Each structure stands twice: as C-alpha cells, then as structure tokens.
Image (tube, rainbow, N blue to C red):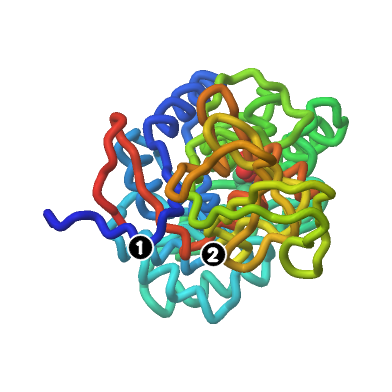
Amino acid sequence: MNEMPLTPRPTIASVNLDHLTHNLELIRQCANGSKVMAIVKANAYGHGLVPVVQHLVKLGVEQVGVAFLEEGITLRRAGLKLPILVLGGILHSQIHHFLDFDLELTVSSIAKLRQVEAVAATKQKQAVIHLKVDTGMERIGVHSYSAKPFIEAALQTQHCTLKGIYSHLACADDPSSPMTMEQIARFEQTLSYFDQIGAPMPLRHLANSGGILHFPESHYDFIRPGIILYGIYPDPASRRILDLKPLLTLTSKVVYFKVVQPNCPISYGATWRSDHMIRVVTVPIGYGDGYRRALSNRGSVLIRGKRYPIVGRVCMDQFMVNIEWDSAYNGDEIVLVGKQGNASVTVEEMAEWADTIPYEILTGFNNRLPRIYLENDQIIPELS
Ligand SMILES: *Cc1c(COP(=O)(O)O)cnc(C)c1O
C-alpha cells in the first residue's frame, strides 16, 4: 500500500472528484426533489467506472444506470451495493445473471417480460424491473400507443417487482426542439393507464442531461444525468445554466524536440509541411489511447501556457506539434484537455475539431491511459 504509485507513462488522465461533487450538487438543485440515477455507462464516460461510482455512493446518489450487464457485474464485484439499472436491451440467456447479481432489468416488450417472469420463477427469485416505453426514439421499448397491454401484463406477473417505468428523450439537448414536449405528452399518456387501471404508479423517469437542463416537466421521480455529471454540456445548443466543472484533465510531457527544415513533411502520409524552419515537439499519446486521429492537422495543445497546433497525422502512440520558434524542453508539461496558465482546451472544442460530439471524445479514452483521482485536491490511491 505504501509503494510509490507506478507511473508507467508521462501521459495521465486526472479525474477531479471534487468537481463531481460540485456538479451533482448543481444538478440536484436544478431538479429539486427528484432522486438521482447517475448514468455511468461506458466506463463512466471514460472517467473510470468503479472510482466514479464509489464517489457517487459517498455523495448519496440513490441509484446508478449502466448500459450493459457486464458493467453492472463489474460494480457488484467491486463490492458496490446500491441499486443498479441496466438500461440496454436484454437477451433471454442473460436474465439469470441479473438475478444472481441483483441488477435491475429494463423490460422492453411483452415477450421479454414473459422471459424474465419465467426465469425468475425457476430461480424462485423476484426480478426488479423497469418498463421501457418508446415515445419517439425508436431504439428499444414498447411504443407508447401500445403500452396499455404491456403495463397490464407487467402488473399480472408474480416474480417481477415493477419498480419503474421510463422512456428516453431524443432531442432534449436542444431547448428549441418541439420533439421533447411531444415525447413528454406521450409519456404522460402512458402513465395515465395506471390511473385508468387503478394500479399504483411505479417510479417514473425520463430526463437525460438535456431534459434536466431544459425541460422541468421531464424531471419526474428520478433524473438520469450522464454527461453533465462529468462537467460537459450535451450540445453546443444547450443552455449554459449551471456552472459545471469538467472532471477530466489530460496531460502529457514533451518526449522529443527537434528542428525541422523547410519543406520536410511530418508524419504518416506526409500531409503537412512548413515553408520555413520550425521547432517541433513529439507528444507520447495517440489514437491507441483514444486521442482521435481526426485531430490530425486540426487539434491544438498547450505548452508553457500557449496553444500550438498538431501538425501531420496523429499516430497510434504519438503525434507532433509545431511550436514555431518558441522554446520547449523534454519533460515540459503538455495539456491536451484542461487549463495551463490562461489558456485552455475543452472536450467540446476537441469534439468540434474531430467533427463529433463530446460524448465520443470522452468515452474514447481507454484503459491504456493511466488515470489518477483527485479528492480534496489530493491524489487518492488507485481505487479500481
Ligand atoms: C446515456 C443515457 C442517459 C444519459 O444521457 P446524457 O445525455 O449523458 O445525460 C440517460 N438515459 C438513458 C436511457 C441513456 O441511455
């Protein structure tokens, strides 16, 4: 335990858990009264599943949501006890694992409901289920217009505990899209069946980050924040109404410095060259870590508080940066995401450069990148 932390690479993703505390507090204020189902799929949006959830437990989140069975099992094996909903579609062959690991299921059709009921009966267990209704995403779930028999079937099961009912918003990151109010109306229509039948209402949830920010009508009993927990807005169109702080900082160090003569091309494919003599440094991170190749000749990094452009193609493990005639030394810190002096690079900007969304940038950072966690401004020992 008191060994020096192993830092196999100078490239490090540091995750600021104090910022997670801060963001969650703002999110709770925004959706006053709703409980929180923190969404931690895809390795907690690239931040590290187990350490993030351990911190969320300390913050008292009521529940987490993951996409796949395996993510839920990883959390159980790490000793986490809080309720976990698996949001994705399920196959018959997976159902017994949900029961063994005490994971809540998303039931998205009558056929799947019957399968869950049958497996639970065989195992003499109670399956905890959330019904998934499709109000306009056309992904998984029973269409809201055919949800009544689905709900009736769920109410008649013996071995399923109907804990929740939910749907997912397709356009809530854009406050001006008319789609969200239509989806809310369809969800309301679906919920009204419970009153018609005279059955108790299960927990209702609908709001992703966009819904939380823009549509108070979507908050219901649980909110399901994903990207805003990590301090990033879902879309350029989203309203910046919360003072969110990004959790992720990505830094590396200069591992090589050289002078490049005029007209000498840089990196694979010889896609870039300078017409004058320049200084170039090499950065030891690449698309094999999730630092996207689309940033070739488009992205920038910070060195000594100043922004410099990536030149040539990003390789699997390295890329090059043009510092013109400025100085930099081997070992100098390079900030790829975060602040340095008065300069900063954000995940939103990287997404724009790479023609994608911040979600894809974040979830792309893989486990070859060493991660450290900061709490109370201190590095805490690796948790996972
Ligand atoms: C991913 C996901 C969320 C969270 O979405 P964000 O836009 O990151 O807030 C919520 N609900 C479901 C069903 C999801 O799949």
Instruction: Please give the residue where the numbered disc 2 appears in the rendered image.
Output: 68
The residue nearer to you, when weighing 352 against 324, is 324
Q: Determine the residue positioned at 51% across, 30% down.
A: 340
Q: Position of residue 136 (x, y in %)?
A: 82, 47
Q: Determine the residue positioned at 40% across, 66% down.
A: 73
Instruction: Indicate whether 92 appears above or below 280.
Output: below
Q: Position of residue 272 (x, y in %)?
A: 81, 57
Which corner quadrant holds the N terminus?
Answer: bottom left
Instruction: Indicate whether 273 appears above or below 230.
Output: below
- Secondary structure beneath disc 1? loop
Residue 105: give its label.
none
Gap in Å between the C-alphas at discs 1 and 2?
Answer: 30 Å
Depth-wise, is mark 1 or mark 2 nearer the camera?
1
Left/right placement of residue 27 relative to residue 12 reads right
Does the rendering let one see residue 10? yes
Left/right placement of residue 1 relative to residue 225 reads left
Left/right placement of residue 123 relative to residue 78 reads right
Q: Quadrant of residue 198?
A: top right
Which corner quadrant holds the C terminus?
Answer: bottom left
Tally of numbered tags: 2
The kind of residue tagged 1 is: Pro
Q: Position of residue 44 (x, y in %)?
A: 49, 51
Left/right placement of residue 352 relative to residue 381 reads right
Q: Determine the residue positioned at 45% across, 63% down.
A: 127
Instruction: Please give the residue where the numbered disc 1 appears in the rendered image.
Output: 8
Q: Determine the residue positioned at 50% across, 22% down.
A: 26
